[in-house]
């Protein structure tokens, strides 16, 4: 890897960018990590855990990333070296000069664009998603696409600076994606259902991590029963399994410290949700 550390392309609901360092610390503290250690990042989303591993010197060739959403398409293109940077650049350069026009422009893009360039278009759409909610696909079309407006403070606003509709900015998104495409080629990016993992050949000295849709939280488009997964996993594999959840899933679990604002889409949540890393 060259240059500065990699960062996730953009924020999205459930992403682990603020906790990735603490989670990977646990991997390294509890396991013997060698040059041949394989890592499996399941429900990888924006790739915070895999990115943290690469930032710490783990070869992308030792990492498998699986996700059923458009993130899976993104990571498959990155890992296989097929990400079309020219198309990605063309969409970014086509954004309006006036940020007030972003929302209308993106709504038109979603309604007129097929999924042929899903991997390239997705991070741009997601960077504009209202509240970081995950944009999905359904029946071969984009779905659940709700974009931010450009916001300017009024005389009575507590915040005094405008809020941009795209986070990060087009320039920063391009920088992040360019670095990812350069430094994470060779990762085994897979778009697929998590249950397809049971067809993998997982060595006992591997490390498996799952970041499932959290129980009893805002509905996700892609759901599965994590407790059923754990039982099937125990019967199939010997490698250590780590799972993120908002509750402890067993006696061997660590509560992670979550910094930053309380959050929620409105910012009005009174307390942070809990983050637990459970081991099996």
Image (cartoon, helix red, strand yellow):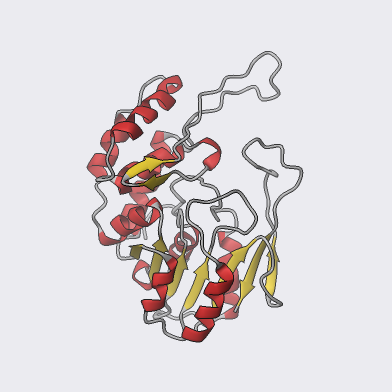
Q: Residue furthest right?
A: 270
Residue name at image x 69 percent, y 20 percent: 157
> Where, quadrant-wise, is the C terminus in this rendering?
bottom right
Quarter residue 225 falls in: bottom right
Image check: 43 left or right of 264?
A: left
Front position in the image: 92 or 221 = 221
Expressed as whole percent of the image width and height from the top left, the position of residue 169 reads 44, 34
Please state the horizontal and vertical placement of residue 171, each as a whole percent of the image. 39, 35
- The front one of 19 and 58 is 19
Residue 237 visible, this angle: no
Image location of residue 120, percent across then percent down: 31, 45
Eyeballing the image, is 160 above or below 236? Answer: above
Occupied quadrant, residue 228: bottom right
Instruction: Identify the residue at image location x=38%, y=30%.
Output: 106
Question: Which quadrant of the rendered structure holds the N terminus?
Answer: bottom left
Q: How many marks?
A: 0
With 183 as the anchor, is 168 left or right in this view? right
Which residue occupies 47% across, 56% down?
222
Nearer to me, 48 or 253: 253
């Amino acid at each position: 890897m060259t240059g500065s550390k990699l960062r996730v392309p953009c924020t999205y609901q459930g992403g682990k960018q603020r906790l990735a360092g603490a989670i990977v610390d646990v991997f390294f503290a509890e396991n013997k990590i060698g040059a041949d250690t394989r890592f499996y990042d399941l429900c990888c989303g924006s790739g915070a855990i895999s990115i943290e591993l690469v930032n710490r010197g783990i070869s992308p060739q030792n990492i498998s990333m699986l996700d059923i959403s458009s993130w899976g398409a993104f990571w498959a293109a990155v890992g296989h070296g097929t990400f079309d940077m020219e198309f990605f650049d063309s969409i970014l350069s086509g954004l309006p000069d006036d940020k007030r026009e972003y929302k209308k422009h993106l709504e038109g893009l979603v309604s007129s664009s097929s999924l042929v360039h899903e991997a390239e278009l997705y991070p741009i759409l997601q960077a504009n998603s209202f509240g970081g909610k995950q944009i999905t696909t359904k029946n071969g079309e984009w779905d659940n696409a709700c974009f931010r407006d450009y916001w300017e403070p009024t005389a009575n606003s507590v915040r005094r600076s405008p809020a941009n509709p795209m986070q990060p900015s087009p320039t920063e998104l391009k920088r992040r994606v360019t670095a990812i495409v350069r430094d994470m080629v060779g990762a085994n990016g897979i778009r697929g259902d998590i249950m397809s993992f049971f067809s993998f050949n997982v060595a006992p000295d591997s490390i498996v991590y799952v970041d499932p849709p959290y129980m009893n939280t805002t509905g996700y488009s892609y759901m599965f029963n994590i407790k059923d997964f754990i039982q099937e996993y125990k019967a199939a594999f010997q490698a250590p399994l780590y799972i993120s959840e908002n509750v402890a899933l067993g006696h061997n679990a660590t509560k992670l410290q979550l910094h930053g604002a309380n959050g929620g889409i409105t910012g009005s949540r009174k307390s942070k949700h809990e983050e637990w890393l459970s081991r099996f």
